[in-house]
Structure formats: C-alpha cells, structure tokens
Amino acid sequence: MTTPSPPAESVVATKYWHALEDGRVQCDLCPRYCKLREGQRGLCFVRARHDDAIVLTTYGRSSGFCVDPIEKKPLHHFLPGTPVLSFGTAGCNLACRFCQNWDISKAREYDRLADAASPEAIAAAALDLDGCSVAFTYNDAVVFHEYAIDVAAACHDAGVRTVAVTAGYVTAEPRAEFYAYMDAVNVDLKAFSEEFYKRRCAGHLRPVLETLEYIRQETHTWLEITTLLIPDLNDSDAEIGELTAWVADRLGPDVPVHFTAFHPDFKMMDRPPTPPATLTRAREIGLGNGLRYVYTGNVHDRSGQTTTCHGCGAVLVERDWYRLGRWGLDGDGCCASCGAQCAGVFDPAGPGSWGARRLPVRLGA
C-alpha cells in the first residue's frame, strides 16, 4: 500500500530497521517486522519506507491534547488524584477487532492530526497546567517512538513525569530505550492466550509477556496492567486464573491489575457488554492468587476501585469513578493504621485534587 504524503516537517529518520537482500527494508521496532518496498507503509500506518530507509511520518503531530485524571489511564498507584496531559498520534501496530479507540489508533488520514507541538512546548504546557504529568495514550506510543522519547526527555528536563499507555508490543532494543524515559506505564494485556492474540489482535502473546517482565525486573518504571474482559473470549475463570497466577509469580504481588468492561465497538459489535459480575469474579480470582491490588474498571464499583491495605484491610485510597474520598496513607506511602507499605509512587504531601475533570487543550495551530 502506498503511503499518502505527510507534511514534510512531520517526517523524521528512525534507526530500528535494516535492508534485506531482496531489496526490501525491514522495520525492527516491533515483532511485526514489516518488510517494505519504496513508498510502502507498515501495518501501523505511521512508519514508512522513504529513500531506502524507515521514517516516522507523524513527528510533532497529535490527534489532540486533553488533561485527564491519572486514574483514567488507569493508574491507581501513581500520584493519585493528579492531572495528566494526555495525547496520541495516529496508528497502531496491533489490529484488535475490539479497539475502543479505533477512530484514533486506526486513523488513515493525516488531517485527523489537527494539533501540533514540539517536545519543549508539551513540557512547558504541563508545567502551566498545575504541573501535571504527560501521558502517551489513545494510540500506542510504540509507533511514534522517536517523538515520545523526545517529549519525555524534554519533560524530564523540566521536572515533569511521563506516563505511557501501551500494548507492550515492541522488540528488545527499542524497548530498553523507551522505558529508560518512562516514569510509569499501564500495559494492556489483551488476554492470556496465544490464540486470542493471533485471531483477535493479529499479534502474539510472548512479546507482551517479555515486555512486562523487562519493565518489572530491569527498570524503575512503575507498572500496572489492564485486561479488557470480553464475554466468552477471554473471561473464563481458567484464563483469568492463569493470568493472575502468572503476574503474581513472575512480576510479584504488588503489580496492580485492572479488569475492565468491554462495550461493543469497531469490528466486534456482536458481543454484549461485560456484566459487572464478571469483573467482580475476576477481581476475586486475582486476590485469591495472591495479588494485593486488583481493580475493576469501566463500571461504577466503589469497592472494586478502592485501594485497601494488604496488611489490615483499611481503606488507603477511596475512589468513586475518578473522584478520591478517604485517604489512609502517611507521608511515606504506608498504611496510617498498621504501617504496612503500599506499593506505588505517592506524593508525601497527600493526594491531588484534580477530580474527574476532563480539560481539552489546544497547543498548536
């Protein structure tokens, strides 16, 4: 497929590729390993072959900026109650039939990228907006690797933290470079079966598990996991049990897991929404397998979204959707009742007060 012409200022060189003997050029950023002839683009749409090299075609371009509550990413153990300046570009390197952000991640037109901002402008905007963090979200930051890293570097220079929301579908070398710049990440673990990844996402499970283990064992990036439960596809007790047992064994009991509700969308309109009871059951299975922090999402469930102490059961962070209530942590992130440490990144001064607000922001022309 021939790539439409992007704005010249949005095209930048990349380094994760190599030439093949048959004349094609292989992109090595993700396990898809797209092999391209001149003028072709990868499945992600935003990485293309140009002048015998792989280029990124959306540098500095965004589908829009918005300040969200950090809990919406979802991140429950990273600076609760604080705002996060969120943005994405276009494209994705998976092909999930149930994508909930398909209008962005599957965008095939550059004119959807209506906003533009340099890395320095994004960092400056975050400082102006209550000193919030910056999140790469809506589509997967893996596909705009170079732009995300430059933004993260500018943010860190300004004292701003960075967050990624990703499917974790990336190869080893770019993965190491990327997570050197991320303060927190939520990885979307689509399911715990290779068949699901192949049939529903056009991908593979193993690279995602390798990313999860790398983040947990080799970086200082705060990690949380989300799995969207789809009725009769990835919501069986057996699969949820295998997933949560693997997390507990390979990543440890302190990694928060979010089970969220599916709603019919994109190319999967034939499935019903996930019943709240399914999420509650998944949470119970995860807790039973030794995980300390298991949450429900996309439904109104105060108990399923509230953080409690693994030592004494006291409420540590009460949540009602994206609004915080009772706060039971001391300045060291420990339970104020029994002193047990709560895993996460917490401000010694206490929670933020951003609440459930959603604030669209325009940074460019």
Image: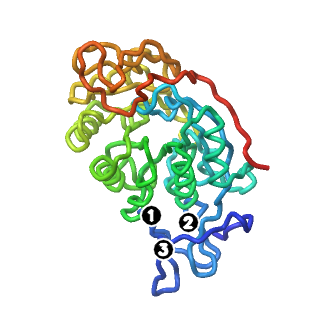
Alpha-carbon span between mark 1 and mark 3: 12 Å
- Please state if 347 lies on the left or on the right of 339 as rendered: right
Residue position for label 3: 17
Location of the N terminus (image quadrant) = bottom right
Q: Position of residue 14 (x, y in %)?
A: 54, 70
Answer with left or right where residue 7 lies relative to residue 306. Answer: right
Reading the image, the residue beneath label 1 is 32
**Helix, strand, or loop for circle 1?**
loop
Depicted 211 relative to depicted 273: above or below? below
Disc 1 residue type (three-letter) = Arg
| Among the two numbered marks 1 and 3 on one chain, the one whose residue lies closer to the N terminus | 3
Of residue 209 and residue 324, the one placed in the foreground of this image is 324
Whether the residues at callouts 2 and 3 have beta carbons within 8 Å, the answer is no
The residue pinned by badge 2 equals 42
Q: Nearer the viewer, residue 74 or 121?
A: 121
The crowding category of the residue bearing disc 3, from other C-alpha atoms within 10 Å (few below 14, some 14 to 19, many at least 20), is some
Residue at 49%, 53% (x, y): give it: 94
Closest to the observer, 48 or 118: 118
Label 1 – label 2 distance at C-alpha: 9 Å
| Label 2: which secondary element | loop
Work out how far the residue at label 2 is from the one at label 3, CA to CA, in angstroms. 12 Å
Please provide percent x and percent y for residue 188: 43, 42
Label 1 packing within 10 angstroms: few (<14), some (14-19), many (20+): many
Q: Secondary structure under badge 3?
A: strand
Q: Is residue 178 found left or right of 116 in the rendered image?
A: left
**Residue 341 in the image, given as x and y percentages of width and height:** 26, 26
Q: Is residue 208 left or right of residue 9?
A: left
Contact between marks 1 and 2 (CB within 8 A): the answer is yes
